[in-house]
Image (cartoon, grey):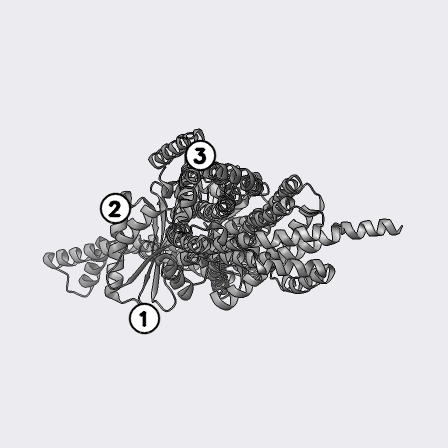
Amino acid sequence: MNKFVKKYSGIALLWLIAVLAAVLFLPNIGSLEAEKGQTKIPANMQSQVATNMQKHWGHHISNTRQVVLVYNNGEQPITKAQQQRIDQRIRHLEKNSDHYGIKSVTSITNTPVAKKQLLSKDKSTEIVQLNVSKRDSVETMNQKLKSGGKVSGVRSYVTGADVLNDDMRLSMVDGIKKTEIIATIFILIVLIIVFRSPIVPLVSLLTVGVSFIVSLSVVMNLVKYFNFPLSNFTQVFIVVVLFGIGTDYNILLYDQFKENLANGMDRVKATVSARKLAGRTILDSGISVLIGFAALGLANFSVYRSGFAVAVGVIVLLLVLLTLNPFFMSVLGAKMYWPNKNLAEQAQNSQLWGWLSKRSVQFAVPAVIVVLAVLLPIISFGNGNLSYDSAVELSNNVPSKQGLNVVEKHFSKGTAEPSTIYIKSDHSLKNQADLMKIDQVTNQLRSRKDVATVASVTQPSGQPIKQLYLNDQLQTLTGKMNQAGQGLQQIQAGGNGQGFNADQLKAIGESAQSIGQKLQTIQATAGNQMTGDQVVAAMQQKATAMGSPLNQAQLQIIGGALQQAQASQSNVSGQLNGIASDTQNIGNNAQALGEQLKALQSQTEKAQQGLSQISGGVGQANNYLASVQGSAAGQTFFIPEQVMNSDQFKQAVNNYLSGNEKTTKITMVLNQNPSSAKAMKTVNDIQNQVEQNLKGSDLDKATVAVNGQSALISDTQTIASGDFFRTAVIMLIGILVALIFVTRSILQPLYIEGTLLLAYFASLTVTHWISSLVLGHSMLTWNTPFFAFIMIIALGVDYSIFLMRKYQTVSGANPAERIIESSKFIGVVVLSAALILGGTFAALMPSGVLTLIQVAIAVIVGLLILVIILPILMSAAVKLTYPDPQKAAEAAEGE
């Protein structure tokens, strides 16, 4: 066996071992993409600062995902029976929170104050907000919640930013599978048509397939072990680039090999010659593509930097094509082109490129003017507005997208993807001054027309708590002061109606004294009367004088009666004496009391005057407080100490203050699509507004950051737009340098890059038109321009190198004739390569992912424009740059 064949047989064996090892050690791509493939924003951007605060939040919800369960009954209100089933399902989730990884649940059942935010106005749709641990992957979490949260008889969905992004990743995976199948079939068909043989397409696909498997395994292991940049687009672009340019390079190599065989070379010499001639062009083109994608490694943005993986794939591709192809070529020889035997008959030239090149040489300046006159107006109609809405990437058949559509239809558009403002201080925020400032910020946000709802620690239900404002507290106070004023008026009125007459009381005292004196006189008189014995003796004397003396018995009866009467009289006399004494005391006391009451009356008059002044002061104070109540000052937040430490307020503290109480959050729902340009501007304005509102307060030095979909895409726009320009400049400079070495010229590389840029900008405008008219999307996705730029510039430069390399090999002294001849020959290769590359990108369209569809359209349109203007502009440039030697000689002779 020939040494050459033995050598490359060994190399083929090594590649076989490499493929087996690549398959054996290939990591789980899905897990890597889910774990490390998400868009990464620099840590100093506001969304990431906020995310870091959320990670250290505490209350067992640190580092969690926000997920929304959506329950919908069509256009009809949720029935009582359906609500019972929903409540039962929520209780099931809470009871089995460990299984689902649920850290908190907010529903109309456990948070009645949030009912307005969780139940739509037409009562047809209810949402449940979950904080779910990041213990499981998003895909696993989604599957669990779909099963655990499903309610019979009600449409149930699981949605949220993380779920939507993961579903886009899964759509990418499905799209890649479709792309691989479609691209393989398409390449087989085109290569069979070009080479009229089934063998060449199989060999080409085999070599490109080897490079794809090996490079994919290398990239994924770099991601796994060395944190190599990765995104959802990495694998799909490795597929289309390697299959696209790999097939192009193979066409160039196989075409040269066929030409060598047709010229009578044996298979080994034909292989060596083809590898030398075509191999040099392949290396030049491959290095230019490699430089283009390697420049992405200098990008700051993770999505752009992940394109560096394609550069790794290009390195592997070049190694495979230039080492494995020689094995098949040297072994098969002419059999590669079976069933064709007369290979010379297959030699073809491109009539299109030959005609375009010839006319451009003849009319160089008009040719350039025509191209510019056609393309510049198209470019001028370009629309610079881009869509950052990741949801548009998904088909409406995806459940998470359906859930999002339901929420946007029945709630505010931002309900499913709310924004959260985090305010981090260096001290506890659980105090009157800071809570008042937080409440002030909350009210100011609510007053914005672009904000639908706002909730904070002072307004957990999304509405101000009336009892915590001075106007409500003053209303209670003024009511009590009104009662006090009325009581004072009653006392004052009673005092005014009860005056004292001390003179009458003095007269009463004098009368009482007089009565006492008279009683004492009566008593004294009664004391001077005869005794009972004296009365009996007198009666006996009178009776004897009359001749009828009293007998002894009569004397005894009269004497006994007189003794009893005398005893009674003596008792009455004693009582009269006591009454007289008491009456005199009453008189004395009455006079003294009269004097005291007279003095008291004077004091009472002074007290009435004081009461009148107090009543007037209470009235004035009440009027002042009433005016304060009705003024702006009445809107001031004030929370009493006992309320601040109450169990009722503790719920709000747990929800809106971090575990150490140094960070608070304010959740808000925008009236706009969270992924729109308006929403991005809104969150930036809000962050600036909150920072300004905190100036001059105890929170002057607090860190303010906004998290959520709007903030994330705002940061994405900021870094992506800046990185796009920077990366594009680096890429163009790198390719320019490579072209200078390839073409050994300074002007030709400038012509080539100018041609590529014209094709790129025109393709964007056309893609925008097609997207609007056919796809129904009026804007390009934010990453379409970048990926289209990379593909059109990096891949389009291949065709320029093909042409200029052929130009260098064509013999002849006349540059114009050489470029025409080169265009005729290489046109077939370029048109075939462009067809295959365009078809490979067309295989992205069934993926259903809008970015991939738009990139595919842009690349196809760009290639179509390029294959038309490349022979025109490069031929005209050669004509204008290099003078005709014959005419130059004639001019020299004339001189």
Measured as percent of width and height from the top left, residue 676 is found at 52, 59
Label 1 secondary element: loop
Measure how far apart labels 2 and 3 are at the Cα level: 38 Å
Please indicate, yes or no, whether residue 178 appears anywhere in the rendered image: yes
Task: Give the position of the N terminus as an image quadrant.
Answer: top left
Element type at mark 2: loop
- Between 763 and 850, the one nearer to me in the picture: 763
The Cα–Cα distance between marks 1 and 3, rounded to whole angstroms, is: 53 Å
Q: To which residue does mark 1 refer?
A: 76
Q: Give the answer, above or below, for where 302 lies relative to 772.
A: above
Viewer-side label of 2, 3 = 3
Q: Which mark is on residue 222?
A: 3
Identify the amino acid type marked 3.
Leu
Report crowding for label 3: few under 14, some 14 to 19, many 20 or more residues within 10 A (C-alpha). some
**Residue ranking furthest to the right:** 895
Residue 519 at x, y percent in the picture: 37, 58
Q: For the residues labelled 1 and 2, say whether their Cβ atoms are less than 8 Å apart.
A: no
Q: Which residue is mark 2?
A: 96
Residue nearest the viewer, comparing 486 with 599: 486
Amino acid tagged 2: Asn
